[in-house]
Image (tube, helix red, strand yellow):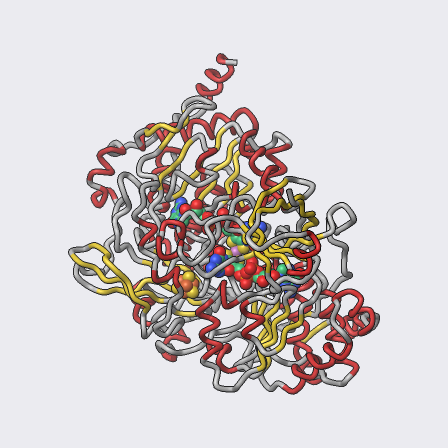
Amino acid sequence: MKTLAKKLAQSLPPIRQWKGPKTAELLRSPGKFGLGQVPTSVKPDATTNLVCGFCSTGCGLNVHLKDGKAVSLTPSTNYPVNLGMACPKGWEALTPLESDDRATTPMLRKQRGGELEAVSWEEAMETFCGRFKEIQAEHGEESVAFISTGQIVAEEMAFLGALSKFGMGIKHGDGNTRQCMATSVVSYKQSFGFDAPPYTYQDFEESDVIILVGSNLCIAHPIMWQRIERNKHNPEIVVIDPRRTETAVAGTQHYPILPKSDLSFFYGLAKVLIDQGWVDRGFIAEHCNGFAEFETHVASFTPEFVQQQSGISPEQMLKLAETIHKGERVSFWWTMGVNQSHEGVRTAQAIINLALMTANIGRPGTGANSITGQCNAMGSRLFSNTTNLLGGHDFANEAHREKVGAITGVGAENITKELGWTYDQIVDGIHAGKIKGLWVLATNGSHSWIQQDKYSEAMEKLDFLVVQDMYSSTETAQQADLVLPAAGWAEKDGVFINSERRVGLVKKVAEAPGQALSDFNIFRLIAHYWGVSERFAKWSSPEAVFKMLTELSAGQACDMTGISSYQMVDEFGGIQWPCRAEDVPALSRDNQRRLFEDGKFYHPDQKAKFVFGDATPVLEDTDEEFPYVLLTGRGSSAQWHTQSRTIKSEVLRKLHPAEIYVEIHPDDAKGLGIRPNSKIKIVSRRSTVEVTASVTPSVYPGQLFMPMHYAKANKLTIASFDPYSRQPSYKFCAVNITVD
Ligand SMILES: Nc1nc2c(c(=O)[nH]1)N[C@H]1C(S)=C(S)[C@@H](COP(=O)(O)OP(=O)(O)OC[C@H]3O[C@@H](n4cnc5c(=O)[nH]c(N)nc54)[C@H](O)[C@@H]3O)O[C@H]1N2
Ligand SMILES: Nc1nc2c(c(=O)[nH]1)N[C@H]1C(S)=C(S)[C@@H](COP(=O)(O)OP(=O)(O)OC[C@H]3O[C@@H](n4cnc5c(=O)[nH]c(N)nc54)[C@H](O)[C@@H]3O)O[C@H]1N2
Ligand code: SF4
Ligand SMILES: [Mo]
């Protein structure tokens, strides 16, 4: 075995081709070598605006500096997104940066089962490249993969996607936007011809009917909710969610459909609109394809059938159809209640179809609008090399490879011709022994991925697991062989793209602790140690990469060639795409840019498409043994995902329960003799989890709700995916309750 490894090592190119100074020297005087702090315009005693690093709303936060150090922040009053408002996470955004469990040096587990030990960057880089190259030599290039995020800046996303796929021979890499946004990506591409959420936040204020599907805006996007609060048209706010959420309570109409009955429900709604003659046939004929087939398809979704499926009566359906018909500016919004489903893509498209058939698109206050999740989910959708070639291009298209190869300097010959595996396929690939090395960045899959035991077992099976994170304490970092310490939000420069396609700026206003480096600089080190630094010579600084990204977008729907610098982004308070040179004269700080105002979509014939399909059964339905549906999602506005950041704030900790809990309806609780706040066990075919019972009518009988912020929630979920987007169906599995 040893001789084979030796032989392999000899046949490999030398690990370190770094011709310049040693890493230690680099770290001491980083600026000199272009590896350290990127100069920004931020003055040592100033206030400067940064886009928030939590959710996709993309609020502007004014960070106040003293002696070059960020000391506090306040929401920006003149940023066009949040207009002076911020949610609790935004107010507390600086707190997680200072915490004892920050990863401050690289750490290596020298033996299986041993402890992680601090090592130098030099050793970390040699081990990283050496181990991955060894694995590739023994098992083929595809045996190393990466899983990343929607939470690092777009420049870093692009660097990761390019370095791994065009530099390191990695074929399979995916983002955690698979957990979150893949459904919207696929549905928009098929319906509109490009992944393009069409709205601007002003639409929340302009609508007279706002329809929120599977979206708990008050908790998950509180500042978007504030924008609705500013609406002067006394809007109908319709919430379609199996739970009586905070948003459902605040809305004006709630349709508590049975979980995963959305597709039938929306097809039924389309049929009512058609039967009543409440569709705009002129708009459809001029701007859409496929309506006749769609009309035939929905004919069998009678109100009686839909009632059986969704629990919503024919009278209620008619009321909703009438609300849409009477509205002059109807906007449809969806989030994870739709995307995280076994038939999410068709459900999202059923919503898009409603907007198209009623001509509620391309006008103020309208649209078929997917609300994004993470701060840079939109950046990762366009620039991560995971769902498409950088900038919405196609790996299979030679002209696209030429364009990307030339602009990025990596050369078309180094660009792969195919998309790699999706997240779930990578996990399956590990189980099948095809993937042996994994690099996990800015995501915490051991907590957040569906059917957790399967994921954790996969991590254990790997020959080498690298985790690049701000903290060494996350569930995934704890399993790693090598931890690379990363700088976080506010400790580096770059852009995020928010839900309304607004490019916003993040700036370095704090030093990362110890030897932690920005992800960007870690990639630069890896490029050197892997021996491909020349290929990535153009990737010299975040702003240089930003300029490449704008060049890459030329001629695409997301064209941003009019954005010339970070300074310009800063001055305009973020800039929405598209922004070509000819759009610049009309730009202003409060200008609002929505898509499809000219009725032209991105398919070659410029028409939108009615896409639809058959309703399909869930993977695991309830039965006698497991009679309850378990729903999961966001628990409070103070908790962020796997809590690696928000748990660090004393203020935020006061705003949510410390321990895992499940919401259960009072009738169910009574029937089982469950007292409020008593301990109960939730049992699925995968696992049993002890939780506190939160007895509340916000869930309906037969349904339970568990927040995702506690690691055990995904012990219960089942690995079920949408067939088109491969997005996990986190929001449905069958469970039972046991009481001691
Ligand atoms: N405070 C906070 N805010 C966040 C986040 C966070 O962790 N914390 N995360 C961010 C991210 S990445 C995302 S993706 C967004 C998510 O934002 P949301 O999607 O709004 O949040 P969720 O709670 O995951 O799911 C929304 C709703 O879907 C409902 N639902 C479940 N099943 C169904 C169904 O079959 N049909 C319908 N119609 N609805 C269903 C649930 O009851 C839930 O109320 O939030 C972002 N904002
Ligand atoms: N049951 C259930 N599970 C779910 C969901 C659900 O509704 N129900 N929702 C899913 C959704 S929509 C999402 S988006 C995922 C989220 O799942 P994750 O992405 O796993 O959640 P986070 O806690 O945000 O993980 C981000 C990690 O990146 C680190 N980090 C932050 N900033 C940086 C940085 O700049 N660089 C580096 N290198 N690291 C950084 C943080 O410390 C953290 O460990 O969860 C999914 N899981
Ligand atoms: S709403 Fe989102 S972007 Fe705005 S402050 Fe809160 S977490 Fe940050
Ligand atoms: Mo998400």
Left or right of 44, for residue 354:
right
7 vs 668, nearest the viewer: 668
Q: Position of residue 57 (x, y in %)?
A: 44, 65
Q: Which residue is rendered at x = 62% and y = 64% of the image?
A: 697
Q: Which residue is rendered at x = 62% and y = 85% of the image?
A: 327
Q: Is residue 345 above or below residue 447?
A: below
Left or right of 168, for residue 394:
right
Q: Position of residue 234 (x, y in %)?
A: 53, 85
Q: Which residue is rendered at x = 66% and y = 50% of the image?
A: 721
Q: Is residue 463 above or below residue 251?
A: above
Q: Is residue 584 visible?
A: yes
427 vs 224, nearest the viewer: 224
Location of ligand 3 given as a quarter of the image: bottom left
Left or right of 629, for residue 26:
left
Q: Position of residue 501 (x, y in %)?
A: 47, 67
For the C terminus, the image quarter is top right
Q: Position of residue 77 (x, y in %)?
A: 32, 74
Picture quadrant where residue 329 is located: bottom right
Q: Is residue 395 visible?
A: no
Left or right of 570, for residue 620:
right
315 vs 135, nearest the viewer: 315
733 vs 246, nearest the viewer: 246
Q: Which residue is rendered at x = 53% and y = 80% of the image?
A: 365
